[in-house]
Amino acid sequence: MTQLQQTLSRSFEFEGKGLHTGKYARMSINPAPEDYGIRFRRTDLGDAEIEALAENVTGTTRSTTLSSGNASVITIEHLLSALTGMGIDNARIDIDNEEVPILDGSAKPYIDAIWKDGIVSQNSPRKYIELKEEVVVTSEKTGSSIVIAPSDTPSYDIDIDFNSKVLGLQSAHWDPSVVYAEEIGICRTFVFFHEIEYLFNNNLIKGGDVDNAIVIVEHPVTDEQLDRMSKLFNVPALALCDNGYLNNLELRFRNECARHKLLDLMGDLRLVGGFLKAKVKAVRPGHTINTNAAKTVRSLLVNH
């Protein structure tokens, strides 16, 4: 049975702070015509348009940035993952600032708004991105690798390893039998406790708070450090749980961190320009290698 393209039944609005810039943005996800793909429109810059394609990636430091001309949009991966996981082919995203709101640190707010009755079929068949050959991208620096192999059934498998005794080695999987909205999209971003002060000092998580990130406590911490962290986030006293996580959130899955990395990977690989019909295997993925893999796929499509 032919899968038809899909778009949104109406516009959906979101607002909040960006994780890295701390800037407040209002954003709407809107219906778009067949074969439109996904495009961002900076309404504060005269409706400057940025296509969600790998060749427009201009930054991968802790999130993925797209740019066209003088217009940029930061931290697009959770939104692109949500649209991919929910099967949205065509959408126009209007945003009045440079960073997508972090919301709860996952794709859940998009899912909650759109999943039940926000998706409509269009008349044209979906155009899958299919490969004729295997794509292998590696990084000696990080020990990361992504293999994208031709396959009739799309799937994603990832392994993560942060040399962390708290996280350990974690894996996650998605294929069409896995309900993205319940198993992957609700998994939140994470950060190590010892990184937070460094990130704040380097202006990298101005919009972070303890409601939108899992905090992993890898090294011993003092009561003074916990108190300082509480004041930093302006929340009641934080404490360390027995499992090595801060008590700000309860894990939704034992391997929620791996599942979130899978969420990111699905979002970044949407930058190939559509739905990949391939088997993806990723080891220690991150935004740089994810988007490099997407760029490699895009270059193969152009050359063929």
Image: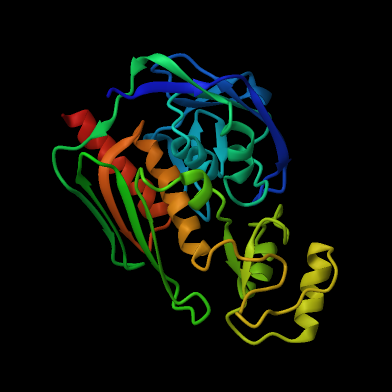
In the image, is residue 53 above or below residue 45? below
Residue 116 visible in the shown view: yes
Residue 54 visible in the shown view: no
Residue 136 lies, in percent from the top left, at 21, 53
In the image, is residue 240 above or below residue 7? below
Residue 209 lies, in percent from the top left, at 73, 58
Left or right, 133 with respect to 297, comes to left
Residue drawn at 46 percent across, 42 percent down: 58
Which image quarter holds the N terminus?
Answer: top left
In the image, is residue 32 above or below residue 257? above
Left or right, 126 with respect to 85, comes to left
In the image, is residue 227 above or below residue 253? below
Total labels: the figure holds: 0
Residue drawn at 43 percent across, 15 percent down: 122
Residue drawn at 53 percent across, 41 percent down: 76
Left or right, 43 with respect to 136, comes to right
Q: Which sits in the foreground, 211 or 299? A: 211
Residue 250 lies, in percent from the top left, at 66, 66
Which image quarter holds the C terminus?
Answer: top left
Instruction: Say how the picture is coloured.
Output: rainbow
Q: Which sits in the foreground, 44 or 14? A: 14
Residue drawn at 44 percent across, 78 percent down: 163
Residue 21 lies, in percent from the top left, at 67, 48
Quarter of image, res 285 = bottom left
Quarter of image, res 269 = top left
